[in-house]
Amino acid sequence: MLWRCRHRNIDLARPLVMGILNITPDSFSDGGRYAGLDAALARAREILSEGAAIIDVGGQSTRPGALEVEESIELSRVVPLIEGIAATCDVAISIDTSKPAVMAAAMAAGACIINDVYALRAPGARALAAEMQAGVCLMHMQGEPRTMQERPHYNDVVGEISDFLLHEREACLAAGIAAESIVFDPGFGFGKSLEHNLTLLRELPRFAALDAPLLVGVSRKNVIGKILGKPLNERLYGGLGLAALAVSGGARIIRTHDVGPTCDAIRTVSAVLQGMET
Ligand code: YH5
């Protein structure tokens, strides 16, 4: 199974890790510490050496309650970093943005994947992705980041999110995006209560059976914090438990801050599920 992302074909025969590289100064992790370009590039190399296949570069915080970042600020954060990574590392780079101008600049700088929490719903986003032949991650979100955790509601959380993803996939295909370029993500924490997140994790095989490979991002999120009663910096082992569960449930890509430990966790699960060959 290949994920077609511009000049790259990413092999999804085995599950792989997407390492998070945030460069927002207010970021809950890494952003503050890696505010400078050199430090961010060093972190990118570290993410690679720990085993990530994809580096997810983000210049805008989308965690609950976050405000929108101005386009020029987002551009000034992500473009030099993507150029620097592309010049020095042979790795797939994804851009975590919802703004078509940022997507376009990121592609010009060397990114090959668009990871958009709004699932390319901004005017022009789908046409751009089609034109670039970019890989795209379509993620589900109920509401918008500033208010999405206030009162999430579903009658059928799995059914509604599946319908959304399939509907957005059709819109992407109609815009000229190749089916092989699309992956799905139920969007953990994006307009979901603890019970919603737990149901989604339990029912992951139903998402894995849809028309696209499945990406899961639970790293350090409140779902872990609520289960364990632990703060952000004590959620590693909980995150590894859920990463192992996600791969066992059919996820192909795990988005995480904790790249080395997550690679080990999912390689062991994959060896059991698929054996050591291929
Ligand atoms: C995702 O799931 N998430 S940004 C709150 C946290 C910890 C982490 C309170 N972008 C996803 O990582 N893209 C983000 O603790 C994403 N899937 C995809 N495709 C939020 C985040 C976070 C938020």
Image (spheres, helix red, strand yellow):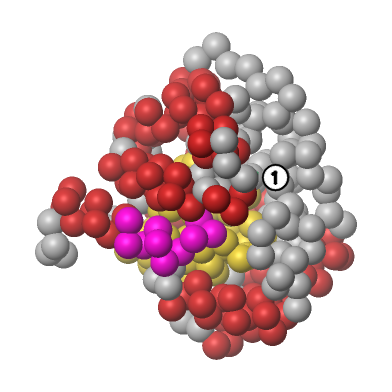
Q: Position of residue 152 (x, y in %)?
A: 66, 22
Q: Left or right of 144: which side holds 268?
A: left
Q: Which residue does the image show at 41% across and 66% down from the upper left?
A: 260
The secondary structure type at the circle numbered 1 is loop
As for residue 168 lying within the magenta part, the answer is no
Residue located 84% across and 54% down the image: 69
Q: Quadrant of the N terminus?
A: bottom left
Q: What percent of the width, then of the height, locates residue 238?
A: 45, 44
Locate residue 278 relative to residue 85 in the image: left or right.
Answer: left
| Stretch of the chain drawn in magenta | 256-265
Place residue 102 in its image quadrant: bottom right
The residue nearer to you, when weighing 29 against 170, is 29
Residue 178 versus residue 104: which sits nearer the camera? 104
Look at mark 1 in the image and give the residue it sits on: 63
Q: Is residue 42 above or below residue 52?
A: below
Q: Is residue 84 left or right of residue 237?
A: right
Q: Position of residue 13 (x, y in %)?
A: 26, 58
